[in-house]
Image (spheres, rainbow, N blue to C red):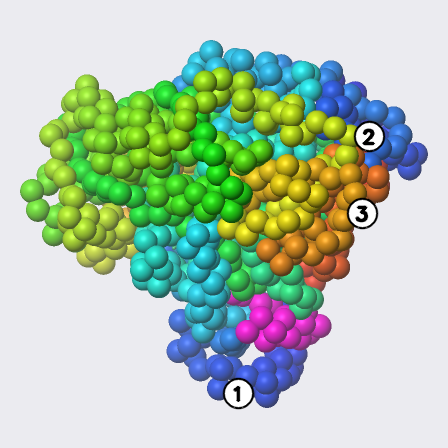
């Protein structure tokens, strides 16, 4: 497969044509429609290596996230950044390329923190390998992390190795009736106090705090924090992560705001039922039909962050804010280093 | 291919003059100061920069870079000079930018658990400045390095097994590019939808892509209980297998450090450790709530007992803990002073945890065969360990044997799916090993270097092999 992809890329480069890299398409809403022939990563699937004792799993790009999580769960391990799938057949390659992490992100780390190494076919058709299977590696530039989040603009990620973590022995979610501002304070404080917090979300007037780890640690945190137990908590967090929770329903665009975790609650959307708070306060979701994106962006900037339309964007400008020119230039130079003939989608 | 030619004396003199005109007595050309900036620690090899400048602001650095970029003069950043792989050797002379005047802690945000510092702040200064907030910054290379230097080398330390390395703990950077532009990278900074992780690219770039001037760092709450313990073993295997087992069971150790018998002998002597024997030893630390720490200790005790470990000696009082970790941080000096007249340098391999026992056994065999005194010490929870090799710098044969042993140990680790460097970096010493490890991948790294530093003025000759 690799060889045929290499040939396909070389041919496109020679003819000055473009290629689009595709997995199952579950996250295609994140980027504009690609051009040219499609290179379907699902043709290169399977777990290459998984010995739970190594705490590392190596997978091909087209492997379904679900299959990987199943294999890992059977060995009491997990991908600790809790990736959203957004589709039954979502692939590992797409997960890395889009670099989306789930509810556990502020507490365990992001996708990139668990990527130990990558193989990639660049725009010249060379199959290259970076990093490997070790927890720490400072040999040369950190290319694996550059590829994480590159959305198919640098090359075809063919294989990735991830750090695995053991599944927590115990887990409980506590729910608290609370207004948004108190929830922001509580999320930040409880985590700083070294409670074994692994997810925090405020939605529809309720704060949900997931605690996980060793049994005594979870029990003592439950006793300290109080609140009510959430009975179906595994399902609840899956729905939240997959955006199948009712909050995400409806047709209006969904805006994602990234900000300081302590940023005060702002009345940005039309009413509190249109806002949710995630990631200990560092991620906010707004659902609004009458989108006033510039105002939201201004608020986010003042709070040290940025805002973009996550779902339902009608233009690239809604999807991402324009970069500082010097930064954009650096990004373009990186793109050109991997893809000198511009075979893969342009940076937008 | 990267190339670089030493600038002419005239070009250098003109640059020095214009630096002096702008920065006055912060432009220094005395031999003593240039000598001080001509090397790091580790293997003695040095080459003098032509001039050392002590900038104080981002804008000053931007204009120095612009000037040097136009005149094609090399620029080498200098933090505290503790790097170990020849990172600071001024291969082509040039300007050394000493960042030790940029020591402001710019922001502390206790609620957000982060802070922003200038590059010259040292890790000890930072921890002293944030102590009142009940927070701490966990990354602790043995030396009191600068946060800029630690970012540039992607440093780690004894806490990495629990808290990660600089890679996981830097949230954003301010970087000055070789053409003198000031850029800000970071998780909360705006990015295009294909958000290249530029923060991670600059972390570990060893001053070859730009100068890091500000760093946004994650901070952590000081845990309710901290308990440190020492356990000694009859043989190295018992100690290593204990570590492997602990990691595989997911015991959230805050620190777990291995010292072999020879290293312990050196440390007992240097750090005056009482009541410990020159035997393979683990230094451990547990963080968490009271109940959680107790549980971790019980779990560890049952593992060490199964592997022939001794009873634990606890260091719970802050002063006892400090003494223990100071001894660990000083292993390099303990090694240096162990045999009078000898020098010592350290290998830095890291392997997957399941290969740790094999790799240490093989490294020890190579070390023994060299006929030199060697000691093993390491952040074994991550699979990273150092063989400190002592040799007589004036004895060419010993020097050669030391070099050979180090290269062979690096290759063994690479063959086991590991790396030649887990934390010290490439500098100039590991350029060949990098090629073995990454093959053609090095070409892409070189292309990136060329694209971001077209005149190759940023620390030329380091990190990425010129050809
Ligand atoms: C006793 C001892 C123990 C050590 N233990 C460890 C350890 O446990 N873990 C570990 O990781 N390392 C360890 N080291 C190595 C060393 O401390 C680290 O590499 C440290 O990060 C270097 O920081 P520094 O400020 O001294 O940087 P320097 O040595 O001054 O510089 C290192 C490199 O970074 C570049 N640089 C410095 N500052 C900047 C900047 N602001 N912008 C761009 N580039 C810059 C320099 O040009 C150079 O290439 C140890 C060293 C010693 C002597």
Query: Badge 2: how crowded within 10 Å, few (<14), some, or many (20+)?
Result: some
Residue B102 coordinates in the image, percent (x, y): 47, 71
Marks 1 and 2, how far apart at CA: 56 Å
Q: Who is closer to the viewer here, B93 or A75?
A: A75
Q: Mark 3 touching mark 2, by CB under 8 A?
A: no
Q: Compared to A106, does B269 lie above or below?
A: below
Q: Mark 1 touching mark 2, by CB under 8 A?
A: no
Q: Which residue is mark 2?
A: A20
Residue under the image location 26 percent in, 43 percent down:
B224
Residue under the image location 72 percent in, 17 percent down:
A42
Q: Is residue B76 magenta?
A: yes
Q: Which mark is residue A317?
A: 3
Q: Compared to A312, does B318 lie above or below?
A: below
Q: Main secondary structure of the magenta part?
A: helix
Query: Is residue A36 shown left or right of residue B365?
Result: right
Query: Badge 1: how crowded within 10 Å, few (<14), some, or many (20+)?
Result: few
Q: Who is closer to the viewer here, B392 or B193?
A: B193
Residue under the image location 88 percent in, 32 percent down:
A35
Give SS at disc 3: helix
Q: Chain of mark 2?
A: A
Q: Nearer the viewer, mark 3 or mark 1?
A: 3
What quarter of the picture does the N terminus of chain A occupy?
A: top right
The extreme left residue here reads B275
Residue A192 coordinates in the image, percent (x, y): 39, 45
Marks 3 and 1, how far apart at CA: 47 Å
- Magenta residues? B57-78
Q: How many marks?
A: 3
Q: Which mark is residue B24?
A: 1
Q: Nearer the viewer, mark 3 or mark 2?
A: 3
């Amino acid at each position: 497969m690799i060889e045929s992809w290499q040939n396909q890329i070389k041919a496109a480069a020679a003819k000055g044509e473009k290629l689009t890299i595709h997995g199952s398409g579950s996250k295609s809403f994140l980027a504009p429609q690609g051009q040219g022939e499609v290179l379907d990563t699902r043709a290169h699937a399977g777990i290459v290596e998984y010995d739970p004792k190594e705490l590392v799993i190596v997978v091909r790009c087209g492997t379904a996230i679900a299959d990987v999580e199943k294999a890992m769960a059977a060995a009491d391990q997990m991908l600790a950044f809790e990736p959203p799938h957004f589709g039954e057949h979502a692939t590992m390659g797409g997960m890395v390329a889009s670099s989306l992490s789930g509810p556990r992100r502020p507490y365990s780390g992001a996708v990139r923190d668990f990527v130990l190494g990558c193989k990639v076919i660049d725009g010249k058709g060379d199959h290259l390998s970076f990093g490997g299977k070790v927890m720490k590696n400072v040999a040369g530039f950190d290319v694996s992390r550059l590829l994480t989040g590159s959305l198919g603009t640098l090359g075809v990620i063919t294989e990735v190795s991830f750090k695995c973590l053991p599944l927590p022995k115990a887990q409980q979610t506590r729910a608290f009736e609370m207004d948004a501002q108190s929830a922001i304070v509580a999320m930040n404080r409880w985590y700083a106090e070294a409670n074994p917090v692994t997810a925090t979300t405020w939605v529809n007037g309720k704060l949900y705090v997931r605690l996980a780890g060793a049994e005594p640690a979870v029990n003592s945190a439950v006793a300290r924090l109080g609140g009510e137990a959430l009975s179906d908590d595994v399902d609840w967090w899956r729905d939240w992560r997959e955006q199948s929770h009712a909050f995400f329903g409806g047709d209006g665009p969904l805006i994602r705001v990234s900000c300081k975790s302590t940023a005060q609650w702002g009345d940005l959307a039309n009413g509190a039922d249109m806002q949710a708070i995630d990631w200990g306060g560092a991620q906010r979701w707004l659902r609004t039909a009458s989108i006033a994106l510039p105002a939201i962006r201004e608020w986010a900037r003042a709070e040290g962050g940025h805002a973009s339309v996550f779902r339902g964007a009608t233009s690239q400008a809604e999807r991402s804010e324009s970069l500082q020119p010097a930064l954009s230039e650096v990004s373009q130079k990186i793109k050109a280093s991997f893809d000198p003939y511009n075979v893969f989608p342009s940076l937008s | 291919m990267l190339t670089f030619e030493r600038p002419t004396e005239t070009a250098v003199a003109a640059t020095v003059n214009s630096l002096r005109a702008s920065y006055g007595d912060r432009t220094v050309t005395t031999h003593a100061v240039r000598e001080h900036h001509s090397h790091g620690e580790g293997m003695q090899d040095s080459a003098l920069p032509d001039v050392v400048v002590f900038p104080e602001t981002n804008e000053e650095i931007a204009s120095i870079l612009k000037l040097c970029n136009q005149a094609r003069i090399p620029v080498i950043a200098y933090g505290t000079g503790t790097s170990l792989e020849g990172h600071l050797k001024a291969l082509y002379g040039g300007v050394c930018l000493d960042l030790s005047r940029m020591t402001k802690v710019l922001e502390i945000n206790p609620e957000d658990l982060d802070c922003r510092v200038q590059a010259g702040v040292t890790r000890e200064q930072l921890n002293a400045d944030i102590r009142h907030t009940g927070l701490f910054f966990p990354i602790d290379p043995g030396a009191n390095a600068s946060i800029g230097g630690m970012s540039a080398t992607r440093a780690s330390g004894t806490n990495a097994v629990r808290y990660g390395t600089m890679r996981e703990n830097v949230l954003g950077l301010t970087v000055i590019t070789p053409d003198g532009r000031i850029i800000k990278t970071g998780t909360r900074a705006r990015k295009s939808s294909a958000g290249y992780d530029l923060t991670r690219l600059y972390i570990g770039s060893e001053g070859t892509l730009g100068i890091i001037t500000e760093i946004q760092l994650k901070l952590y709450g000081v845990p309710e209980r901290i308990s440190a313990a020492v356990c000694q073993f009859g043989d190295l295997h018992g100690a290593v297998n204990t570590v492997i087992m602990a990691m595989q069971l997911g015991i959230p150790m805050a620190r777990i450090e291995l010292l072999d018998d020879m290293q312990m002998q050196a440390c007992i002597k240097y750090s005056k450790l009482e009541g410990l024997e020159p035997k393979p030893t683990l230094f451990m630390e547990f963080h968490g709530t009271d109940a959680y720490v107790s549980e971790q200790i019980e779990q560890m005790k049952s593992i060490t007992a199964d592997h022939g470990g001794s009873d634990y000696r606890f260091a719970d009082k802050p002063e006892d803990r400090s003494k223990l970790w100071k001894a660990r941080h000083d292993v390099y000096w303990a090694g240096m002073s162990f045999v009078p007249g000898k020098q010592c340098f350290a290998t830095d391999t890291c392997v997957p945890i399941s290969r740790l026992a094999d790799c240490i056994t093989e490294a020890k065999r190579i070390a023994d065969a060299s006929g030199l005194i060697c000691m093993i010490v390491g952040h074994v929870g991550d699979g990273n360990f150092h063989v400190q090799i002592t040799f007589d710098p004036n004895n060419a044969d010993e020097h050669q044997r030391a070099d050979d042993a180090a290269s062979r140990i690096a290759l063994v680790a690479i063959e086991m799916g590991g790396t030649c460097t887990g934390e010290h970096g490439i500098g100039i010493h590991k350029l060949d090993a990098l090629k073995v490890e990454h093959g053609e991948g090095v070409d892409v790294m070189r292309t990136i270097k060329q694209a971001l530093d077209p005149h190759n003025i940023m620390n030329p000759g380091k990190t990425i092999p010129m050809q």
